[in-house]
Amino acid sequence: MAKRLSIKGKEETAICRPIAEFVSHYLNGELDAETAKSFERHLAICPDCLSFLKTFKKTLELTRSFLSTKAMASDLTRVQRSLKKKLNLIKPARLKHPTRK
Amino acid sequence: MRGKGVARVESRQPAAQNEEFLIGRLKAGDHQAFDAIFRLHSGRVFQLAYKILGTKADAEEAVQEVFLAVYRKVKTFTGQSQFSTWLYRLTVNTALTKVRRSKRRKEVSYEEFLPQFQKDGHHKVRPVVDWSYEIDDRVSDSEMRGILKQALDALKPQDKAIVILSDVEGLSDREIGEVVGLTVSAVKTRLHRARLFLRGNLAVRLGYSPT
């Protein structure tokens, strides 16, 4: 559901705090249309909040890119073998009867 | 030897039905179904554990613990949530337990990295510097990777897991809530604060004010 903020009616120069509080909702498209417009009107006149928004978005971009790099491949067959040993899923090799050839 | 039945079903049926079949077989004690489930999911479990724990050895240990739990607890899996969600929960819980046990971590207070405001609602430190356009030129890739790793490691372990589940695994807030045991609104709040913290932490590491 769209989020309605309590910034309506406030002086547009004095809503820096809700910009920071609801920037994630704004970027996720979770603000109602009217609130999103107030948000954008404030961004148009407040260079501080515009810088805040840009650095917030850059942080998301950098974090996503860093976290999306896959780890070096691991040889999980070794892990699987040791796991099966722990669970006794590997049958022990059958021992030959000492008297039989 | 691999079960012929398992192989036949793997090739014929859609993934979800195949998974359901394998879980059913595993509940009945079929070891080959366990092998098949391991092959299907271990890579993803490893990647998620690696991102939370940060080392290959720890992630491999986590894979082993997760699949031990799968084997031992599969009978408690009722199918009310998706198997992948259950597996995510086991992986995140296993990894977080390991992080909490480790003595390497230092608790960092979020407050000093969150934006701060004056009484009239304006930013406390002005002007707020837009460092977004210059850091690609100023900081090398490897240096940036180091900075990001340190910033992510400074997050509370559960918050780091939430960021990873959202940004890398692409889970919805509701799914993340199921995995970590929080409400949707709590997930949203934690995710937002974690991102504000990361922004402030990056700003400080790059020589700017966090506000």
Image: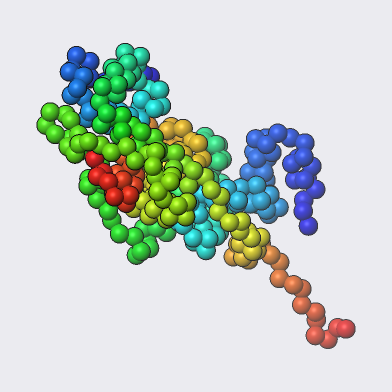
- For image coordinates 19% across by 39% down, the residue present is B125
Q: Is residue B173 visible?
A: yes
Q: Is residue B57 above or below residue B47?
A: below
Indicate the position of residue A60 as horizontal and vertical percent values.
41, 38
* For residue B30, side relative to residue B137 (left or right): right
Determine the image quadrant of residue A71.
bottom right
* For residue A31, side relative to residue B172 (left or right): left
- For image coordinates 65% across by 40% down, the residue present is B19
Question: Image quadrant for the N terminus of chain A?
Answer: top left
Instruction: Please name whichever residue, B168 or A96, is drawn nearer the observer in this view of the structure.
Output: B168
Q: Is residue B180 visible?
A: no
Question: Image quadrant for the C terminus of chain A?
Answer: bottom right
* For residue A33, side relative to residue A61 (left or right): left
Instruction: Please name whichever residue, A29 or A50, is drawn nearer the observer in this view of the structure.
Output: A50
Indicate the position of residue A10 as horizontal and vertical percent values.
18, 17
In the image as oriented, which residue stretches furthest toward the bottom?
A: A99
- For image coordinates 74% across by 35% down, the residue present is B13
Instruction: Please name whichever residue, A77 or B3, is drawn nearer the observer in this view of the structure.
Output: A77
Q: Is residue A91 above or below residue B69?
A: below
| Number of numbered discs | 0
Q: Is residue A58 above or below residue A17?
A: below
- For image coordinates 48% across by 47% down, the residue present is A66
